[in-house]
Amino acid sequence: MKKVIIKRLFESFSELEKAIESARETLEKKENPPVELLERISSYEGILAKQRSLATALCGHASLGNWDEVARHVKIINGLSSMIRDDAREIISGATPRYDSEQREAMLC
């Protein structure tokens, strides 16, 4: 059961990566894409790499039976995924960003 859950977690990273790539492709098709949006996409690629690192650490905690750390890592990973996915959808739909630069930076810290 644990292996299935962990496998699904890593599969979700691939899905998230596709959403990020789709957002980048949508922007790059536009004439003079907004630099701020391209920077957001780049930051999400970095966050995705961090999520993969957290998931690898999560596997170690799971093998040791450290369930408090497993739960903590899952919450962090899920929160970051939700933020990226929602924002990527806004970019694709052409919606205006909900957050100004300071607010986004505060969320990423």
Image: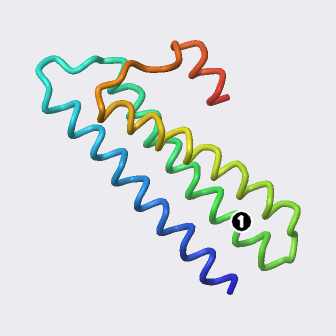
Furthest residue to the bottom? 1
Q: Position of residue 30 (x, y in %)?
A: 14, 26
Which residue was labeled with disc 1?
Answer: 58
8 vs 17, left or right, is right
Relative to residue 33, is residue 54 depicted above or below? below
Please count the marks in the image. 1
Which of the 4 quarters of the picture holds residue 33? top left
**Residue sitting at 78 percent across and 79 percent down?**
63
What residue do we see at 37% from left, 18% from top? 36
Is 3 situated above or below 11? Answer: below
Residue 75 vs residue 20: left or right? Answer: right
Residue visible at 55% across and 58% down? 52
- Of residues 78 and 57, the one nearer the viewer is 78
What is the basis of the colouring in this image? rainbow
- Rendered position, 81 above or below 58: above
Q: Secondary structure at mark 1?
A: helix
Residue 51 is situated, as x and y percent measured from the top left of the image, at 58, 52
Give the vertical position of 62 relative to 17 (above or below): below
Question: Which quarter of the figure has residue 41?
Answer: top left
Picture quarter with the C terminus? top right
Instruction: Give x and y (percent) for residue 13.
Output: 48, 59
Location of the N terminus by quadrant is bottom right
Residue type (three-letter) at the residue carrying disc 1: Leu
Q: Is residue 100 left or right of residue 91?
A: right
* Circle 1 residues within 10 Å: few <14, some 14–19, many ≥20: many
